[in-house]
Amino acid sequence: MSRGALVLALLGALVGGSAAGGARPAAPPAAPPAGAAPAPPAARPGAPHRAGELDCTACHQGKHQGVVRMYLGTGGRGTPMIPSHMFQVRVECSACHVAPTEEELWAGVVGQTFRPSEQACIGCHGERFRGMLGRWSTTLARMQEILAPKLAAARGALGGADPRDPRVRTARERIDDAEFNTRYVALARGVHNVFYAADLLKLANGWLDEAMGLLGRPPARGDDGLVRGGYCAVLCHQQAGVRLRETVTFDGRSLPHARHVTEFGAACTACHSADVHKAVTATPQTCGSCHHGPQNDRCEGCHRAQADFYRGRTRTGLAALEPNPMAEVVPCTGCHDFAGKPARQAVAVRCLGCHDAPYLALLREWTTGYDRDVGAAAAAVRRAEAALAAARRAGRPAGEADAGVREARRALALVRAARVAHNPLGADALLQAARRRAEGADATARP
């Protein structure tokens, strides 16, 4: 059954509509004979009151419609339909609302309301779900608390803005939509569809930040990691005992999954769908937008080889390495701007922010010039490898030559990985060491 058909079928069951049962509507009553008095109105089938009694629907209308829409995953702004997982398996209201609030003796007097009970969760899902309902309520409440000052700040910034400015009009729309989603989650009881509710609040948070930007203001400060998309683990995984995987494979690479969450502050929905459980929505472009975005200055978390080389922390017995003289005053983003193309020409332009134009010749020497030195060292290693292979075929002792080749390879690989320009003096020392080791191994391996 398609999602749309499922919605139509279960919506009728939830709200008690006659269409859900498929019954044909009754034919209208026949008109009375001419001149006869009209018949008194008949009681409506299934109506809670007899004809002539007070009709409560004159005041009480549309009961629970917001809650039903929340359960179906509709009614909010900015997100596709996300039905509750329990709705998708046809769990009706009475499965969770099992705790009567009135004694049976008085239920006929004041009516009966059935409250949700955690015991219903445990009855279906087991003991590990004990506390899940309370966690949902407190987490959604915390998310709304995070949004409240941001919404107030946005309304305040809007108050003094020119309403004729197109950016201000767009900002007003974003703020209105954010306020709608926030109130909708509160009034429609977000626990009926907790991930849909959380997604609505996440969108509201983004809209408020966007609105502040349109109004020329910085986003309101505060830790909004939970509402940005970090709610998956808090709402469910922690309570259900799901362990955060240390590493995962993505696009053919092993990634530090846990570090993205605990150290880098990545939100779950940055890479995973809020609609389909466990579905991965991230692409290589998703990674680049964060890792090489203008707001990311934590390059060293991934580019450790280059950072250690730049700061003289590379451990090697092949040469004595000192930090690059700029390491104490120039961070990675001082030279690299990954908002554009990470080309050598782009780095060269950044140099001119601190240095005169002749300095560009140094950068060319550190890149194109050193490419020749890297090539010369690589050629020396290849010659030593060939001599070593010949010595082994001839049965000559080659232990000393083998050690020299290994050291030369390590020095060359380190320079290639860390890049010459990050520490030209260190690179020069390592390339010289590589050539010496390779040439010594070559001489030792020959007869």
Image: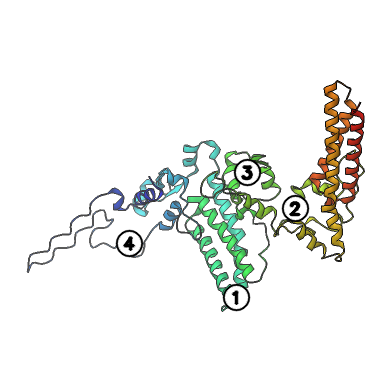
| Quadrant occupied by the N terminus | top left
Q: In 3D space, how far apart are the residues under numbered discs 1 and 3 (Cα atoms)? A: 47 Å
Which of discs 4 and 3 lies nearer the camera? The answer is 3
| Local SS, label 4 | helix
| Foreground pick, 444 / 78 | 444
For the residues labelled 1 and 3, say whether their Cβ atoms are less than 8 Å apart.
no
The residue shown at (66%, 53%) is 288
Mark 2 lies on residue: 298
Looking at the image, is mark 1 or mark 2 earlier in the sequence? 1
- Tell me the crowding category of disc 3: few under 14, some 14 to 19, or many 20 or more residues within 10 angstroms, Cα based: few
Which of discs 1 and 2 lies nearer the camera? The answer is 2
Callout 1 amino acid = Gly
Mark 3 lies on residue: 251
Q: In 3D space, how far apart are the residues under numbered discs 4 and 1 (Cα atoms)? A: 42 Å
| Local SS, label 2 | loop
Callout 2 amino acid = Arg
Mark 1 lies on residue: 159
| Local SS, label 3 | loop
Q: Position of residue 60 (x, y in %)?
A: 36, 62
Which of discs 4 and 1 lies nearer the camera? The answer is 1
Looking at the image, is mark 4 or mark 2 earlier in the sequence? 4
Residue 98 appears in view: no
